[in-house]
Amino acid sequence: VEMEKQVVDGLREVFQSGRSRPLQYRKQQLGALHRLITEHQEDIEQALKQDLNRNTYNTSLFELISIENDIKLAESEMADWAAPRPVKKNLNSALDDVYIKPEPLGVVLIIGTWNYPWAMILQPLVGAIAAGNAAVLKPSELSEHSARLMKELLPLYLDKEMYQVVTGGVPETQELLRQRFDHIFYTGSSAVGKLVMEAAARHLTPVTLELGGKSPCYVDKNCDIAVACRRITWGKFANCGQTCIAPDYILCEPSIQDRIVEEIQKTLLEFYQTDPKSSPDYCRIINTRHFDRVLALMNECTIALGGESDRSQCYIAPTVLKDVLPHFKIMQEEIFGPLLPIVTVNGLSEAIQFINAREKPLALYVFSSDKTVIKRMLAETSSGGVTVNDVLMHYTVDTLPFGGVGNSGMGRYHGKHTFDQLSHHRACLIKSFAMEGLNDARYPPLTAARLRKAKFFMQHRLCSCSGICVWAVIANLLAIGLLVALIVVLNVNILV
Amino acid sequence: MSREQKAVDRARKAFLTGRSKSLEYRITQLKNLLRFVRERQNEIAEGLKKDLGRSEGGTPLYETLGLESEINLAVKYLKEWAAPRPVSKSMMTISDQVYIQPEPLGVVLVIGAWNYPWAVTIGPLIGAIAAGNAAVIKPSEVSSHTSKVMEDLLPLYLDKELYPVVTGGVTETQELLKQRFDHIFYTGNGTVAKIIMEAAAKHLTPTTLELGGKSPCYIDNNCDLAIACRRIAWGKYSNCGQTCIAPDYILCDPSMQDRVIEEIKKNIKDFYTEDPKKCMDYGRIINQRHFKRLMALLEGSTIAVGGENDESECYIGPTVLRDVKPDAKVMQEEIFGPLLPILTVSSADEAIKFINQREKPLALYIFTSDNKLIKRMIAETSSGGVVANDCLMHFSVSSLPFGGVGNSGMGHYHGKYGFDNLSHLRGCLIKQLKMEGVNKMRYPPHTADKLGWARFFILKHVDFGSLGRMVLLALMAVFVAVILQGYFTD
């Protein structure tokens, strides 16, 4: 029997024993995960330095803080999230218990990727644990030091019978995908996303696909270009451009192109000094294959800034390309590297047209002080998410669902959304044996009178009587009543 | 270009004109759909009678009333559903606009089934229209008369470019599945569902699959058996058992079996008279193929009630099978017919074990007066939905998400869920270009100090709800203090 089958079968058996059902158990596991990343922060930083030349602050900022945030949120909100959720009743169900009960799905497969190897696996894992599932983690083999460390550390902290790490390359992943899971959570490319979904189809397994695309960044001439470029530069060159929601390319009017290049140049100097290669904050391309791929994208382009490279280090300097044309190679695929093409357009309408002629991206960015520009851009395009007047930041708002649409993916997560995504929302209707008379309307023989009765009951809704809401209303009424009484009493005394 | 390709192309072009974006437009289409359902009751009923032997009363009760209710709901709440949904903010986003914006997906494919052809084809369509999508409607060819009614009459009420009806069989469906959609909504069986999801994967198209399974029905010793059996008989034999959430089989204690059989027999007579074949309210099996399939399932089991059949009419009488074994033919697939097997189990524990050894069903039914047992059964099993002490009814509660889990499906709909399921819920963060100083902590060169600030701002959660309440309390205290002061200084 293949190793992968053994792993999944074993996890399923333990899951079915009900071990992960108590919230206490899940909280315990989350606490352990928290300790893992705090106690081994240095080891994680070291692994990332070897994988991507990430420095310590970058690691915390881009990975560990998000994971920590999700863990803390899940720990404090889990009871709320996992509790039955009452819903609005209709006349028919007025006397019944009607609610949605979130339940674990079973065994979840989480396939990570190499650009943020810890966040891309552990953030979904937090939701999987909180929702009561078992999980198989498959870290990307491209970020091999992180993968190795994850495989080593996880069993030291988490219940290894519920959560296992499986490392390996394409053959191991393919073998995993032959097994039956209750949900597959995949982060990576659209091409592989299709294969994952195809494999999932064989078992009717639902999927969450966090993919990518070319996230456009429209800079309106009516905006604070200096600040805009500062933020864009940060978002583009962090992690050497290897971010799924990095601003892929800029769209702007020709009149401001030079100014944009100027401002980016200024910012690059501030961030990475004169020689980004020796800056501790500037990362490297993950491997030579991607290095070659990214470098080749520069071929037809006019370099406005940067362009230097060093294959022995997988180093590509922060590069800006101007007057890029839509048919250039660099505009045919997601760049995922430190090349920032500027494509000029004659205004907002052309920018919108340009964006809509392409696949729906994972993120959309628009910089403008003009509310009508923002409104139009948002209303006339589609994308996984949007940040206006900044980049990347919608990722950090855990109340916003993070995910793609169309080619950029399906499903979403972060915060409570991960919990919901990896749960089954079971509709529950608890009736009693009473009031059987009401049911007569539905039983044969179906006479006109019975039909009228049925119609009446089916077409009226009642308000939702959530317990908390009722108490809040009562408490407020009492408070106001007391206040009024106090005023009345005092005024009466004054009068007397 | 094939006929199917043309229809999808036209729908996409119509969608790209943007006319389904406006809420007024969607509401007009929904209201037209409502008029259709109301004005064409006769044609709808006729089609259903020819397809399934559905009685006159059966049409509104099982199909059109539900649709009317859903359309009215969508029209009433569309503005609310489609509006931006603000979410709670953190310290970092205190001065920003943070909300979720529902958006149409594009062109949705709705593949219907034949058992409640209107409910399961038009039901999803309501959500598709409300969410602002175009929709290609592919009714099931098995309910051919209904399919023709849809093809002929829907275009007289709905925008025929945005919502084309494409009829046909396997070949036409396969051709449709080659096209690119923004969502595929399929109701039917697991085998075909796998093919559909595989086809969808080629375009990275999300799917909603409303499938089936064997929905177990557990009858506890401690319950009002007469009422339980009445409700079960209704749920089982409606539409001749051809309901995705029909109670597929009964689990009960051996000591209860005889009484259960007796009660169900009584109710069959109540509902369908001594001769169900002549009763208007008793339906027919959809076609010969399914008739033969069902007759074959009887093999090896003991008939306690019914068993009469007539192939020429696709008639199978309401049937109960007793002492059925787990390996019997009738227990190997979803019955989808008027055969009700009873399997005996010696306890709730055994019932739970039995249920968990099998695929997660679309529905689970529990009949008991013991609330603790209900809770336990729900906690220790899984299913698309659950109803305690009745059958089918969760389908009509529009505030409950209707859908399966595992082999019984993925995704859900009804009410607002229908809208959300066929929308893209886009996360939006609207910042301003000022307060750039705050961003310093995230820019290189990175320092420990900067990181400290970043941690503080990201990890600190402020509950504005409780903050507001504290402020209100403080104001009230101040107010009271002012009054008291006035009182004491007088």
Image (cartoon, coloured by chain):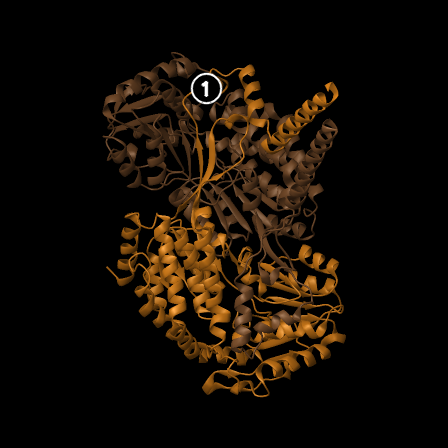
Chain colours: A brown, B orange
Which of these two is toward me, B185 or A133?
B185
- Residue A131 percent across, percent down from the top left: 61, 45
Which of these two is toward me, A46 or B295?
B295
Q: Is residue A423 visible?
A: yes
In the rendered view, does A341 fall on the left or right side of B486? Answer: left
Residue A63, placed above or below residue A358:
above
Looking at the image, the residue that sits furthest to the front is: A496
In the rendered view, does B119 fall on the left or right side of B338? Answer: left
- Residue A171 percent across, percent down from the top left: 48, 45
In the rendered view, does A47 fall on the left or right side of A269? Answer: right
- Residue A340 percent across, percent down from the top left: 33, 26
Dot 1, crowdedness within 10 Å: few (<14), some or many (≥20)?
few
Residue A205, placed above or below residue B84:
below
The quarter of the picture where the N terminus of chain B appears is: bottom left
Q: The residue marked by circle 1 belongs to what chain?
A: B
Q: Is residue A214 visible?
A: no
